[in-house]
Amino acid sequence: MERTKVVLAQPKSRSLRTTIPAGIARQFGIDEGSELGWDIQARDNELVIVVVPMPVRGTKEIITVESERPTDKPRRKG
């Protein structure tokens, strides 16, 4: 499992920032400037964070990365 640390995006901001591990970025084609969609979903009485690399304009491919618990590995769907 890859592990990253969450830090403040800016000193006076409430937003947080983390690093996408190089292997995960490579696997899902995430580069500098890529956009990610974030969603929270309820599944089996748990909240799940879903991160979706958004398609580049002019393409239709969407890759969904899901993780139900910090110990689960993301699964590629799409």
Image (spheres, grey):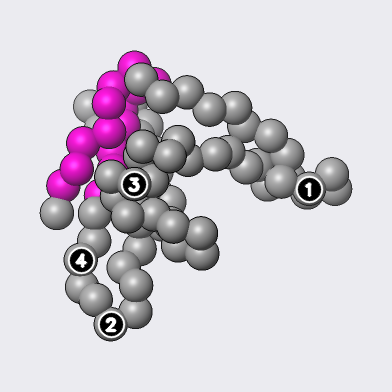
Q: Residue furthest top?
A: 71
In the image, the segment drawn in magenta is 64-77
* Residues at marks 4 and 3 touching, judged by CB atoms closer than 8 Å: no
Mark closer to the chain start, 3 or 1: 1
Q: What element does badge 4 sit on? A: loop
Q: What element does badge 1 sit on? A: loop
Mark closer to the chain start, 1 or 2: 1
Mark closer to the chain start, 4 or 3: 3
Amino acid type at circle 2 is: Gly
Amino acid type at circle 4 is: Glu
Res 69 label: none
Query: Closer to the observer: label 3 or label 2?
Result: 3
Mark closer to the chain start, 3 or 2: 3
Amino acid type at circle 3 is: Arg
Bin the neighbour count of mark 2 within 10 Å (Cα to Cα): few under 14, some 14-19, many 20 and up: few
Amino acid type at circle 1 is: Gln
Query: Closer to the observer: label 1 or label 2?
Result: 2
* Residues at marks 1 and 4 touching, judged by CB atoms closer than 8 Å: no
| Label 2 sits on residue | 58
Bin the neighbour count of mark 1 within 10 Å (Cα to Cα): few under 14, some 14-19, many 20 and up: few
Considering only vertical position in the picture, is 12 above or below 66? below
Considering only vertical position in the picture, is 11 above or below 21? below
* Residues at marks 1 and 2 touching, judged by CB atoms closer than 8 Å: no
Of residue 25 and residue 6, the one placed in the foreground of this image is: 25
Res 10 label: 1
Q: Position of residue 35 (x, y in %)?
A: 45, 62
The residue at 28%/82% (across/down) is: 58
Residue 62 location, quadrant: bottom left
Res 26 label: 3
Bin the neighbour count of mark 3 within 10 Å (Cα to Cα): few under 14, some 14-19, many 20 and up: few
Measure the alpha-carbon separation of dots 3 and 2: 21 Å
